[in-house]
Image: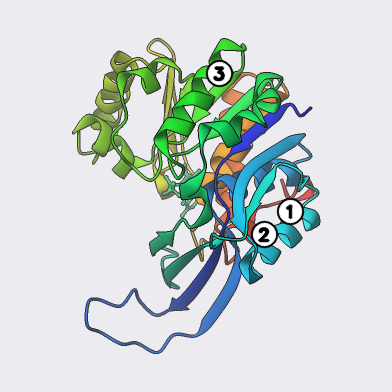
């Protein structure tokens, strides 16, 4: 049994880096392309494993070439394959990513594939992993009934639950009630609160609104501006690391992985946030998502 269980998807990230993100109808000549591991859940599991964390990853893939990439990626990152469901009738997920090489910013279209067919019955075969973990981390890339079932089970079993509410999508009150850490980025925070974040005051307002919705602790990640944390009483604001960002794909995942790892090691909240901020900052200095996660020795 692992200290941390991550539930989420694997996708093959096919990314194109060039002088800009083309607008509709435009063709540009880019410079580099890469096919590598992605999917928020898989990226987060890789980040944890590379930090030396003890992590299980639950996911679903197809029996195709990208499914092979998934299994090879897990092996390379010392994450067990035994919690990966494989279905020959489904495709492994893929994501098309366009990266602006000057800013590292991106635009992404994800085809989730196999995980869209995950059911509560399938997940229940792996539920003991969640029940016995200290930390349960998930996102919103899987069917919502499955995600909520796992969050509730984790909470009932005494786990610390982290929901990275991405991609932004409507969730019920029951979700909020079963979340210890809610970790949106600025755009996601706006989606859940209706508050557009352009300064520190609006960041606090959005975080306070999320606490009122029922989550216990909120971390709003602010890209190159860092992050804001509150539990309704304490407030912590951290500036981002000063790094030369070339590709921010997966920065949020690196952050969530770092946070889960810190919590599993029972570090205090400030130490967890500093670690996650550092892991995320470093991840922006390399191309790719899963492949850009730093190792403990880099920290
Ligand atoms: P997401 O990747 O989910 O959109 P953010 O863009 O908010 O999330 O980034 C998550 C975290 O990654 C930030 O809180 C910060 O720690 C780090 N980060 C992102 N962009 C940069 C950057 N340009 N320089 C340094 N750190 C960054």
Q: Nearer the viewer, mark 3 or mark 1?
A: 3
Q: Assess disc 1: are there few (<14), some (14-19) or many (≥20) residues with their C-alpha within 10 Å of its C-alpha.
A: many
Left-right relation of 90 to 135: left
Give me the disc on residue 49.
Answer: none
Write down the quadrant of residue 73 in the picture.
bottom right
Instruction: Name the residue rendered at 39%, 62% in the picture.
Output: 108
- At x 53%, y 48%, the residue is 40
User: Could you tell me residue 103's position as x and y percent?
Assistant: 41, 66
Q: CA distance from mark 1 to mark 2?
A: 6 Å
Which quarter of the figure is the C terminus placed in? top right
Q: Dot 2 corresponds to which residue? A: 70
Task: Evaluate whether residue 194 shows in this view.
Answer: yes
What residue does disc 3 label? 153
Q: Which one is earlier in the sequence, the residue at label 3 or at label 2?
A: 2
For label 3, the SS is helix
Q: Residue 285: percent from the left, percent from the top?
A: 58, 61
The residue identified by callout 1 is 74
Q: Position of residue 133 (x, y in %)?
A: 69, 22
Q: Please identify the quadrant where the N terminus is shown.
A: top right
Give the mark nearer the N terminus: 3 vs 1: 1
Q: CA distance from mark 3 to mark 2?
A: 27 Å
Q: Inspect this view and state whether residue 220 appears.
A: no
Q: Residues within 10 Å of mark 2 (few under 14, many from 20)?
A: many
């Amino acid at each position: 049994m692992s200290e941390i269980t991550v539930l989420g998807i694997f996708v093959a990230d096919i990314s194109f880096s060039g002088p800009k993100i083309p607008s509709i109808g435009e063709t540009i000549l880019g410079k580099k392309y890469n096919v590598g591991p992605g999917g928020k859940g898989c990226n987060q599991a890789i980040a944890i494993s590379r930090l030396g964390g003890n992590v299980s990853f639950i996911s679903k893939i197809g029996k195709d070439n990208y499914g092979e990439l998934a299994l090879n990626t897990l092996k390379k990152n010392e994450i067990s394959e035994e919690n990966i469901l494989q279905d020959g009738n489904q495709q492994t997920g893929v994501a098309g990513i366009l990266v602006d090489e000057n800013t590292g910013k991106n635009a992404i279209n994800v085809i989730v594939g196999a995980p869209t067919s995950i059911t509560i019955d399938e997940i229940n075969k792996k539920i003991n992993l969640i029940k016995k973990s200290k930390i349960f981390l998930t996102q919103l890339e899987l069917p919502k009934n499955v995600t909520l079932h796992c969050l509730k089970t984790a909470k009932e079993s005494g786990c610390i639950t982290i929901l990275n509410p991405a991609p932004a999508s409507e969730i019920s009150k029951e979700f909020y009630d079963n979340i210890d850490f809610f970790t949106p980025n600025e755009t996601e925070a706006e989606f859940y609160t209706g508050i557009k974040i352009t300064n520190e005051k609006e960041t606090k307002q959005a975080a306070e609104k999320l606490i009122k919705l029922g989550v216990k602790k909120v971390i709003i990640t602010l890209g190159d501006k860092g992050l804001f944390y509150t539990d309704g009483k304490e407030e912590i604001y951290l500036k981002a690391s000063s790094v030369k960002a070339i590709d921010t794909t997966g920065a949020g995942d690196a952050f969530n992985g770092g946070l889960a790892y810190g919590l599993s090691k029972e570090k205090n909240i400030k130490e967890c946030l500093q670690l996650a901020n550092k892991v995320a900052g470093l991840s922006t200095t390399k191309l790719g998502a899963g492949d850009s996660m730093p190792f403990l020795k880099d920290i």
